[in-house]
């Protein structure tokens, strides 16, 4: 089901010539001097579209630095006056929204810890009614696409048409190289549900360390994400929050300069013709796969009937292990990724179990 959002195109409200738009600045506004110094260096790079800074910081444990609070809005006003950069802050409740709008903040974003709570999002949405300000919505901390969609819908229903999403990765119990797992498939699904919705990428929170940021930023652009939000601090080694994932303004400028920008479409007729030819082949193969899947399920139904009539259980672990091993060996020989094949086989197996369960239940009926 498509999301029914009313959104103004990004280029009508993000008029910076920088492509893709870059939102950058410190994780936290710590002091007026730190924020102003960072802002000036970022402005000098000529690559930053919007200055970001956290002034209200949702923290996991009490006693941790929770931001400087409202005084940071005054610092942002001064930074904007001295650099010309529009400003952006995170808002987590109605009071934040009211204070940010009164201070002339140009862009607001809803954080991952807020997106996860519909009550919080609705409170923010109600406070935004009547405002004409860009709002960016980060994905929820947990991998729940419905929560992300719901948050975007609530903000849009409040009359906010300058709307975008921010992909910042998802929490996972599995320890990997990333602070938050990218789970690109969820961002792709969101783009499929709302093709007109701009999606920014936040490599800082996905990576958790600055070394991985170039890789994630490039992949985001290759997946046609429309902008980036990257944390930058004048001296990350002494940052009060998230020191490992912040870049100096100079390092950030160099990173952006190394990124490769690709077009979503091409006007080259040869390219279009070749792409059409290859896509037709894909369509034909996909049709064959679906036909074969339908044939397979017909056989599964017969197996279910035979098991039912013979009083045999649906699940037979030894058979599943045999299928998994044989198919994985075959996939490996064909240079297919085993993780992909494993997930595909699991989907097929689950559907087979579901069909056989339906057949078994026919007896009870």
Image (cartoon, rainbow, N blue to C red):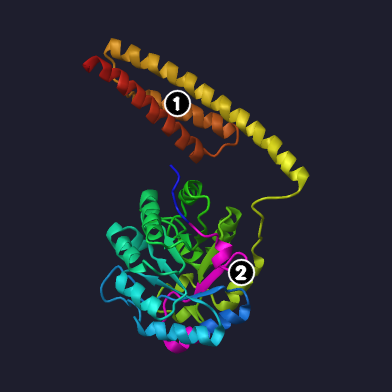
Q: Position of residue 252 (x, y in %)?
A: 58, 73
* Above or below, 225 relative to 51: above
Q: Nearer the viewer, residue 42 or 63?
A: 42
- The quarter of the rendered structure image containing the N terminus is top left
What is the number of the mark on residue 323?
1
SS at mark 2 in the image = helix
Residue at 57% in and 65% down: 12
Query: Is tag 2's residue or tag 1's residue first in the polypeptide sequence?
Result: 2
Which residues fall within the magenta stretch? 7-36
Mark 2 Cα shell of 10 Å, populated few (<14), some (14-19), many (≥20):
some
With 257 as the anchor, is 329 left or right in this view?
left
Residue 331 visible within the image: yes
Indicate the quadrant where residue 76 lies: bottom left
The reply to whether callout 2 and callout 1 are in contact (CB within 8 Å) is no
Q: Residue at x 38, y 68 (%)?
A: 130
Is residue 47 shown above or below 81? above
Q: Looking at the picture, how far across and down is residue 70, in whole percent?
A: 35, 82
Rendered image quadrant of residue 103 = bottom left
């Amino acid at each position: 089901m498509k999301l029914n959002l009313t959104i103004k195109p990004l280029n009508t409200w993000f008029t910076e010539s920088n492509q893709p738009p870059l939102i950058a600045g410190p994780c936290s506004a710590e002091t007026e001097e730190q924020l102003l110094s960072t802002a000036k260096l970022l402005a000098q790079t000529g690559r930053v579209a919007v200055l970001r800074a956290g002034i209200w910081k949702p923290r996991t444990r009490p006693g941790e630095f929770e931001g400087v609070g409202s005084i940071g809005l005054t610092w942002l006003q001064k930074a904007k006056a001295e650099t010309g950069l529009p400003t952006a802050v995170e808002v987590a409740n109605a009071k934040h929204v009211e204070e940010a709008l009164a201070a002339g903040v140009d862009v607001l974003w809803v954080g991952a810890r807020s997106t996860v709570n519909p009550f919080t999002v609705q409170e923010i949405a109600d406070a935004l009614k009547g405002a004409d300000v860009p709002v960016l919505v980060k994905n929820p901390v947990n991998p729940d696409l419905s929560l992300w969609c719901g948050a975007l819908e609530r903000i849009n229903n409040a009359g906010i048409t300058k709307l975008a999403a921010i992909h910042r990765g998802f929490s996972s119990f599995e320890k990997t190289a990333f602070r938050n797992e990218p789970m690109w498939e969820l961002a792709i699904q969101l783009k499929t549900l709302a093709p007109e919705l701009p999606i920014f990428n936040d490599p800082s929170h996905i990576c958790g360390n600055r070394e991985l940021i170039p890789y994630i930023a490039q992949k985001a652009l290759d997946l046609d994400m429309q902008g980036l939000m990257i944390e930058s601090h004048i001296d990350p080694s002494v940052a009060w929050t998230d020191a490992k994932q912040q870049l100096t303004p100079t390092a950030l400028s160099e990173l952006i300069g190394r990124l490769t920008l690709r077009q979503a479409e091409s006007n080259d007729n040869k390219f279009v013709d070749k792409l059409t030819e290859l896509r037709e082949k894909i369509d034909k193969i996909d049709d064959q796969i679906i036909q074969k899947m339908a044939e397979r399920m017909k056989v599964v139904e017969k197996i279910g009937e035979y098991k039912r009539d013979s009083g045999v259980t649906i699940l037979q672990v030894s058979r599943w292990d045999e299928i998994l091993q044989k198919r994985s060996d075959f996939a490996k020989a064909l240079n297919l990724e085993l993780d992909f094949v494993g997930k595909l086989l699991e989907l097929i197996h689950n559907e087979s179990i579901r069909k056989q369960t339906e057949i078994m239940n026919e007896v009870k009926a």
